[in-house]
Image: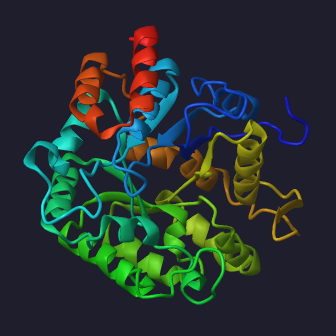
Amino acid sequence: MSKEFPKVKHKVIDGHLHFYDWKDENGVDFFHCFEEYRNEMGLAAINLCALPSGYGCDVTSNLMCAIYKLINKNTFAHAGLLYKEYPMGEKLPEYMNFATQLDELEKIGFDGIKMIEGKPTAHRTIGKNLLNSDHDRFFAEAEARGTHIIFHVNDPKEFWEKEGGDYYGDDTYATNEELYRQAYAILEKHPNLKVTFAHFFFKSDTPKDLIELFEKYPNVCVDLTPGWEMYLSFYENKAYFKEFFEKYSKRILLGTDAYFPRPSECSMWLVDRVYRFLASPDIVKAVADRYESGLCISNEAIENITYKNFESRVSKEPKEINKEALIEYYQKYKHLMTEDDIKYVDSVFEKFL
């Protein structure tokens, strides 16, 4: 057990992890990349979030999550939607409309959907706002099915204000206000949508906005994946947020946004700091070289955030992968993949399917 990162003392599901490559820098396959992290920290389960949308038209991100889930039975996964091309054009071809994709992904055994289409970079790549008929058909179907969606909308508002690094202040990106407008319009039309907005919906500086959302929409939640700017807000307003986290503990999920291929110690550091923020009086180096103690909220509130909310919105156990449905999906969409990725997936399927 790591002395620097002790095992968590509550049941914890890390609800927000990613892949970015098949192998690490040493050429080691991704098959069990998060297991050291999960075991060392004593996590009950992890949830992988695929990211095909806005980062290429191919299906490899979904396949990685499905393969990992097939091999590691304590793994949940949220798949991403596929696009035939970028910008997405006037209308998707019927064979890959988003409602059809949802049906295919659920048959494979995915536990929900991850959307990054509200992030400024992905939104620009897609080239269309999210209020179009293709997305609306998907949201209607997801609402009817009770499908859980992890939805990245916006980024820190200072990215529109300060040049350098991520900067969205030119006219090629949607504004911060416009991206929120689209998200609110989706909720207005689909008020029972089961959605968790990632990164606290970038509302740590205006938590009353979240309170209004929670009170109006019964299935809206947020997760605690850093952006560290939100933790600065938490630390600077500890008394307020301790009360907030207690009162709205059933609307908040734990996640780290950790990813492969980074060393497992990076994932351990992230979950240690997020967990201690909730549960521990220990003073630790957290963000921006600040040493802070956690909120020390009640045990009931901690358990809601660390696992109960995820289980109530997704499932207590991950779905099993349907191998036949996975192969059928791969054959349908492999034309969107690179030749190298196809060769690799063929070799993996030969080994595991």
| Res. 117 in view | yes
66 lies left or right of 253: left
Colour convention: rainbow
Q: Is residue 250 above or below residue 153?
A: above
Write the residue at 51% across / 81% down.
168
Horizontal and vertical percent for residue 344? 46, 23
Write the residue at 36% across / 47% down.
80
- In terms of depth relative to the viewer, which is nearer, 34 or 26? 26
Horizontal and vertical percent for residue 275? 71, 51
186 lies left or right of 241: left
- In terms of depth relative to the viewer, which is nearer, 180 or 13? 180
| Res. 15 in view | no
Write the residue at 65% across / 34% down.
43
Q: Pick the quarter of the image with the C terminus.
A: top left
Write the residue at 41% across / 80% down.
173
Horizontal and vertical percent for residue 148? 34, 49
Q: Is residue 251 above or below residue 9?
A: below
Q: Pick the quarter of the image with the N terminus.
A: top right
Horizontal and vertical percent for residue 147? 28, 47
- In terms of depth relative to the viewer, which is nearer, 299 or 127? 127
Q: Quadrant of residue 38?
A: top right
328 lies left or right of 253: left
How many numbered markers are drawn? 0
